[in-house]
């Protein structure tokens, strides 16, 4: 390919804000709202260190994913397929299995049903899945719509949770939080006695997005126009192309590795790190800590916390008792909406992952340069919705069980994709664009951590 493109000059930081909000919102309904507060409600704040370490790990994982897309203007899936073509099948299967389990929308339905006093939330969960499909189908461009929705919900939901958590806290609670952030619990260090290791690993993996969802960061920053992504195309809505099926070029563009382009890359790299640190890491960490803190201050030590996600409903009831019924109701509504939005974001991201990999294979077989990506995208959207509806109809709808099972699967998927992206950046990025030694060491540490933890969970589940 001719070296005809120029590495674009960096844009203002405020114009870059967006992709990190989407990937942050993907974790709000799994680790932040459900799994970490669930653990805290049962074992106290001594597990809080795991959330800090988990989201820090994901920051570095995400930045290596962004690195490739920034330089190449294409997703990491396109890059990985160049040296491991069969990886497309792994990404499709592991994504569908890991996130096709509709635990988060089930949790949203259960919380919203509690607001209206409805016992059987199965039919509401089915309705929410269909609404998600409609929202994703009618938007003009999917990325633009997702960015707007996630910003609104995060800017409303996170401050509300923060205020509630601080309001209910006392001096002892703040002391417990400080100790928990360094791993000291009530009678234990790091891991609480009797805590299910699978639940902890699931929460750790979901400290942020989790699983293959991290990889969509390369798609989102490409569509936002970061770096060489300025030359890429967005996925249009199914009805936004006036009857003509949109064809999208998946491969990026090349540029000359001269001093000016390297300088532009470094300027981009500095700002994308700052954007992701402020939005994903900082806001994500505050969200997780405050949600854990709220659970500790309201329902820690109460009976019934181990029963699914009923601790969330108990939080709402406790807030009502300590303040006013209206405030407890608003809390449940906010949580229900945050969970719904998370399922919406996950449905979009997983469909992007699977459609892009299916398109890569289709292009390889046909020899074409472009593919009708949006059509494949919507096939996967509605395939996941259909799968979720079938599970609900057969009464597989316990939110916590579905979320923990999916989280354990996705923890292993994170191990796999972190290894593959590390190989990708080493093989396909020129020296000026590769990570420095200290970043490589951090990534190797993350790989070792997930490898050991996955092996421990596998052994525990196999012999339990």
Image (spheres, rainbow, N blue to C red):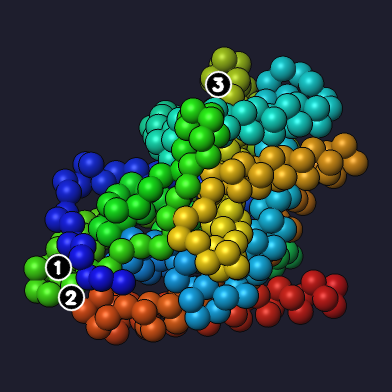
Point 47% across, 55% down: residue: 370
Name the residue tied to disc 1: 261
Q: Quadrant of residue 308?
A: top right
Q: Residue farthest to the left?
A: 260
Q: Quadrant of the C terminus?
A: bottom right
Determine whether the residue tagged by mark 1 lies in a helix, strand or loop: helix
Q: In this image, 8 relative to 348: left or right?
A: left
Q: Where is residue 254 in the image (x, y as percent from the top left)?
A: 27, 68
Q: Where is residue 364 in the image (x, y as percent from the top left)?
A: 56, 68
Q: In which quarter of the image is residue 133?
A: top right
Mark 2 vs 1: CB contact within 8 A: yes
Mark 3, residue position: 330
Q: Callout 1: 10 Å neighbours few (<14), some, many (20+)?
A: some
Q: Is residue 272 above or below residue 174?
A: below
- The residue under label 2 is 257
Q: Which of marks 2 and 3 is in front?
A: 2
Q: Quadrant where the N terminus lies?
A: bottom left
């Amino acid at each position: 390919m001719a070296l005809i493109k120029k590495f674009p000059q960096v844009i203002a930081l405020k114009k870059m804000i967006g992709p990190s909000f989407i990937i942050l919102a993907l974790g709000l309904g799994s680790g932040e709202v459900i799994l970490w507060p669930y653990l805290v409600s049962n074992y106290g704040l001594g597990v809080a260190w795991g959330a800090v370490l988990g989201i820090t790990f994901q920051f570095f994982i995400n930045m290596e994913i962004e690195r490739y897309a920034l330089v190449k203007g294409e997703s990491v899936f396109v890059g990985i397929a160049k040296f491991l073509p069969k990886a497309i099948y792994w990404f499709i299967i592991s994504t569908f299995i890991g996130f096709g389990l509709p635990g988060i929308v089930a949790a949203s339905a259960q919380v919203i049903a509690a607001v209206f006093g409805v016992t059987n939330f199965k039919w509401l969960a089915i309705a929410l899945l269909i609404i998600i499909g409609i929202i994703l189908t009618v938007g003009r461009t999917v990325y633009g719509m997702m960015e707007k929705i996630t910003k609104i919900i995060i800017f409303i939901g996170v401050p509300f949770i923060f205020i509630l958590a601080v309001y209910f806290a006392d001096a002892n609670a703040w002391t417990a939080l400080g100790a928990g952030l360094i791993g000291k619990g009530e009678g234990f260090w790091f891991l609480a006695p009797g805590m299910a290791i699978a639940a902890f690993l699931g929460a750790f993996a979901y400290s942020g997005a989790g699983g293959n969802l991290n990889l969509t960061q390369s798609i989102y920053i490409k569509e936002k126009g970061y770096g060489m992504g300025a030359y890429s195309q967005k996925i249009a809505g199914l009805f936004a192309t006036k009857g003509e099926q949109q064809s999208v070029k998946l491969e990026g563009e090349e540029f000359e590795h001269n001093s000016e382009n390297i300088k532009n890359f470094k300027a981009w790299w500095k700002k994308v790190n700052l954007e992701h640190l402020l939005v994903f890491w900082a806001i994500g960490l505050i969200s997780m800590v405050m949600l854990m803190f709220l659970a500790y201050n309201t329902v820690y030590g109460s009976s019934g916390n181990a029963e699914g996600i009923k601790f969330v409903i108990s939080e709402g009831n406790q807030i009502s008792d300590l303040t006013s019924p209206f405030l407890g109701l608003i809390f449940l509504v906010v949580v229900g909406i945050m969970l719904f939005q998370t399922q919406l974001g996950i449905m979009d991201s997983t469909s992007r992952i699977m459609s892009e990999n299916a398109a890569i294979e289709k292009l390889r077989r046909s020899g074409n340069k472009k593919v009708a990506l949006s059509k494949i995208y919507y096939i996967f959207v509605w395939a996941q919705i259909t799968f979720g509806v079938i599970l609900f109809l057969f009464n597989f709808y316990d939110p916590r069980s579905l979320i923990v099972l999916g989280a354990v699967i996705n923890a292993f998927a994170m191990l796999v994709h972190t290894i593959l992206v590390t190989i990708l950046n080493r093989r396909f990025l020129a020296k000026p664009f590769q990570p420095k030694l200290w970043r490589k060491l951090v990534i190797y540490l993350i790989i070792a951590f997930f490898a050991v933890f996955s092996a421990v969970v596998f052994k525990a589940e196999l012999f339990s």
